[in-house]
Amino acid sequence: MSTLVLFTVAYLVVTIAIGLYAAKFVSNSKDYLVAGRGLPLYMSTATVFATWFGAETVLSVSATFVKDGLGGIPADPFGASFCLVFVALFFARAFYRMDLLTIGDFYKKRYGKGVEVLTSLAVTLSYLGWTSAQLTALGIVFNALSQGAISLNQGILIGAVIVLIYTTFGGMWSVALTDLFQSVVIVLGLIYVAMLATGMAGGFDKVITHASEAGKFQFWPTGGSKEWWAFVAAWATLSIGSIPQQDVFQRVTSAKNENTAVKGSLLGAAAYFCFAFVPMYLAYTALMVTPDAVKPLLAQEGREVQLILPNFVLTHMPMFAQVMFFGALLSAILSTASGALLAPTALFTENVIKPLFGEMTDKRFLVMLRTVLVFFTAGVLMFALNNTSTMYEMVQNAYKVTLVGAFTPLVCGIYWHKASTQGALVSALTGLAVWGICEAFFADATVPPQMVGLFASALGMVAGSLAPQLVKDARHGTHAT
C-alpha cells in the first residue's frame, strides 16, 4: 500500500472519529438537527464556508473555468456567494427568531400542512443532485488514489458508507466539528499546493497574464438575448434557488444567537468567494504545465474533465503535496456531503413523515431521523451511480426545483402580508408545472425553463392571494376574502 493511500486512510479514520465523538453532545432532536443552537461565531463561519466549498468547487468549477473562463461559472462561486449574503441580510434574523427545526416548519407555520408537505418534498428531491455530486467526487478521489484498482462506482459506494457512519450518530454536531477540522485542512492544503504549482508555471504573474490573454477573465456574455438569459438563469438558480434549502437554514439556526447567525453567514460567504478561486488557479497552472494531459480532458463531454487536478497532483507533485491536496479535497467533499445528507433527512422526517404518525417521543423521533438518513443515502447512492453529468451540472439542476417551487412562497411569506395559503399552493404548483412543461418541450427557448417557472410562481402567488380564497388560510383558520 502506497504512502499516499496510508495517509488517506489515516485521515478518514480521524474524520470518522471526530464525527463519532460528536455523538456525545446529542441528547435530543434539537441537538441532532441544529446543534442545540449553540455554535459560536468561528464554528458558524466554518460550517457556512464548508457548506459550499465542496467537490464541485475543487474539481468541477475549476475545470469549467479552464474550459470556458469566468463566463462559464456565474452560478458558482458568484451565485453561491450571493446566496449566503442574501440569507444573512434578508432571512437569517427571521429564521432564527421563529425557533424552528427545519425550513419546512416555516411553511407549516405560515401556510399550513398542505404547503409544508409540498415544499418539503420539492426541497428534499432537490438534494438528490447536490448530494450525488459529493458522492461522485469521492468516487473520483478513490479511483485516482488507487490508480484504477477501485472503480468510480466502487469509490462512490465506499464514500457513501464513510459519510453515513459519522453523520448517523452525531447529526449537526458531527457536521459542525468535522467542518471546523476540515476547513483548516482545506485552506492549508490548497494554499501549499498552489504555491508549488506557481513555481512550476513560472510565477503568479505569468499564470494570470496567460489566463487573461486566453480570455478566461471575460465574465459578461458576449452574445445576444439568449446568452444573457442563460447567464442570468445560471446565477439566479444558485443565488436565490438555494435560499429555501435546509442545509443553509440549519447553519443559520445552529448559531448561538441571531447576530452570530448573520455574521457567520457573511463571513462564510466572504471566505468562500475568495477561496473558491484557488482551485481555478490551480487548474489553470495544470493547463500551462501539462497541456498535453489537460487538453484531451477538456475535449471530453463527460465527467472525465474533473480529473484535471487529481491527475496533475499525482503526476507532478511531491508526496507531501499529494497528501496535502487529497487531504484538502477529501475535507471539502466530506464536509459538504455530511451536511447534504443530514439536511433532506431532517426535512423529510420532520415535515413529511412525522405528521403521519402524530405525537411521538423525542427518542423515537431521533431513531426515525437516523433510519431515514440511511434510506436517503441509499437513494442518493443509486442516483449517483446512474448519473453521468458533471458535478457543476448536478448542482445547478438541483436548485431549479426549489427556485420554481419554494422560493416565492418563502420570500412572500416573510415580506408580503397578503400572501395566503391559497397563494402559496398556486405558486408552488404553477411554478413546478410550468417549469416541467418547459423543460420537456421548450428546453432550448430563449428564456430558460427555470426562469419561466419562477415568473409563473410569482404570478401564481399574486393571483392566488388576491383572488377569492377557496382554501382556508392558515393564519386565520377561516376562508379569507
Image: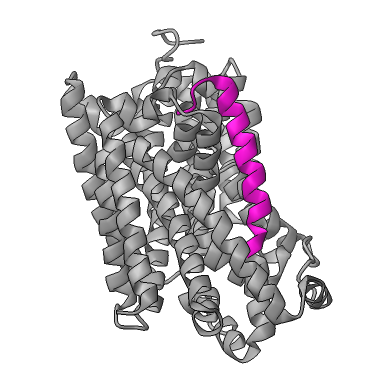
Q: Magenta residues: mostly which secondary structure?
A: helix
Residue name at image x 62 percent, y 45 percent: 239
Residue name at image x 36 percent, y 60 percent: 11
Quadrant housing the N terminus: bottom left
Res 380 seen here: no
Q: Position of residue 322 (x, y in %)?
A: 49, 73
Residue name at image x 68 percent, y 81 percent: 200
Tell me the colour scheme of the image: one colour
Q: Which residue is more in the foreground, 312 or 403?
A: 312
Q: Does the magenta run of residues contain 276?
A: yes
Residue 28 vs 176, above or below: the answer is above
Residue name at image x 33 percent, y 45 percent: 18
Would residue 51 be found to the left or right of residue 388 on screen? right
Q: Position of residue 297 (x, y in %)?
A: 55, 83
Count the labels in the image: 0
Res 216 seen here: yes
Q: Which residue is more in the foreground, 140 or 72?
A: 140
Would residue 159 be found to the left or right of residue 44 on screen? left
Q: Position of residue 185 (x, y in %)?
A: 50, 55
Residue 431 vs 396, above or below: the answer is above
The residue range painted magenta reads: 254-278
Residue 83 vs 191, above or below: the answer is above
Q: Position of residue 151 (x, y in %)?
A: 31, 78
Residue 29 vs 270, above or below: the answer is above
Q: Which residue is more in the foreground, 342 or 162?
A: 162
Q: Does the magenta run of residues contain 364?
A: no
